[in-house]
Amino acid sequence: MSTAAHAIVDPLGWSMVAASSFRILLTGALRVALCATAPFLGAGPCLAQQSAALGDFPVKRIRIIVASSPGAADDFFARALADELEGFYRKKIVIENRSGAGGLIGNTLMSRANADGYTLGMIGVTRIITQLVRDPPPYRALADIVGVAHVASITNVLAVTPAIPVRTAPEFAAYARVRIGELNYASLGIGSASHLAGEVFTRALRIDAMHVPFRQVSDTYVEMVLGRVHYAVYTLPAVLVPVREGRLRALAVMTPERSRLLPDVPAIAEVGLPEAQFDSWSGIIAPRGTPRRIVEQLHGDIVSGLRKAALRQLFVRQGAESTPDSTPDGFMRLMQEEYLRYQALIRERGIRPE
């Protein structure tokens, strides 16, 4: 291109840039004026601008880390909620099972995740217990997270072998108190939720019993049916079938009220042992530092799902109750109370991992 041509094009180019810059400045000034007059004209334009600046959520898929294997209670709840959230967000919700070491692997991963709302965790009491029984602690059970939603409470059941001649919790208490050191109870491992549940019940009865850990619940059933293991406190889904088949005998549910799945089995308070109450729970958490607006949005969408009759019935069939009236702060308080309770119990009983 010739020098004369450059002389023509350049002035035109700079004129276009100047005009464009003037339009941008004018548009910005108008937006500022609209926001300044929002109290009088309505806040729509201003809020729309702020919303665009903050960005929509979610804009990509969310993953939920579960520190247990597929089929466990936390995994079941996570998958049920994922179906609901996919309907809200029109985006895939990925369930990532990171089981092993008593929940250590998955819970550590949750603590180290990015605090952007795209990595969540479905947790239960095991997150607290695993930290309390490890020295040094592998993660900070509560300091590393924020509560999003308390999802479910799970019924636990006091089950005994049919080999002993008792049919009620008071009869069992009388039977146990005259057999000091003769009885034992099962759990799914040292430091597991079922271990602490058994300790809570044993302490409430003021008896001395031996703890017998197992790797699988099916192994427990064999030993209890044979009468070599005397009792256990397991979640209702784990014992419902053997109880209904008569292979185990349910003496009480460890919750304030009876279960709809075992309506003839009394609540633990009904048999005079309210201090033996042991609720299992599951909930959604996010890494510490996740923006509050994202936490509140997730909470609202999760609660909307929990209020659906179909999801409530699905939970009931698993021996659980959905908890749609929770709040993020309320869930954190629940976990803090549980932390203090189990911290005291673990110290008193000297519980340490194998």
Image (tube, rainbow, N blue to C red):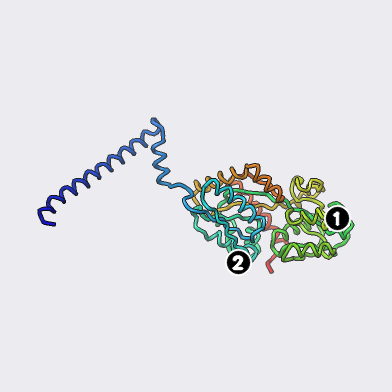
* Residue at disc 1, secondary structure: helix
Q: Residue at x 59, y 48 (%)?
A: 149
Which of the numbered marks, if any, corresponds to residue 91? none
Which residue bears the numbered disc 1? 172
Which residue bears the numbered disc 2? 136
Kindly tell me whether residue 165 is visible in this rendering.
Answer: yes
Q: In the visual, does 19 lie left or right of 334?
A: left
The image position of residue 124, as x and y in percent, is: 64, 55
Q: Residues within 10 Å of mark 1 (few under 14, many from 20)?
A: some
Q: Amino acid at mark 2?
A: Pro
Earlier-in-chain disc, 2 versus 1: 2
The image position of residue 231, as x and y in percent, is: 81, 59
Q: Quadrant of residue 26?
A: top left
Between 154 and 212, which is closer to the camera in this rendering? Answer: 154
Instruction: Tell how many labels.
Output: 2
Q: In the visual, does 235 lie left or right of 205?
A: left
Q: Residue at x 82, y 59 (%)?
A: 207
* Residue at disc 2, secondary structure: loop
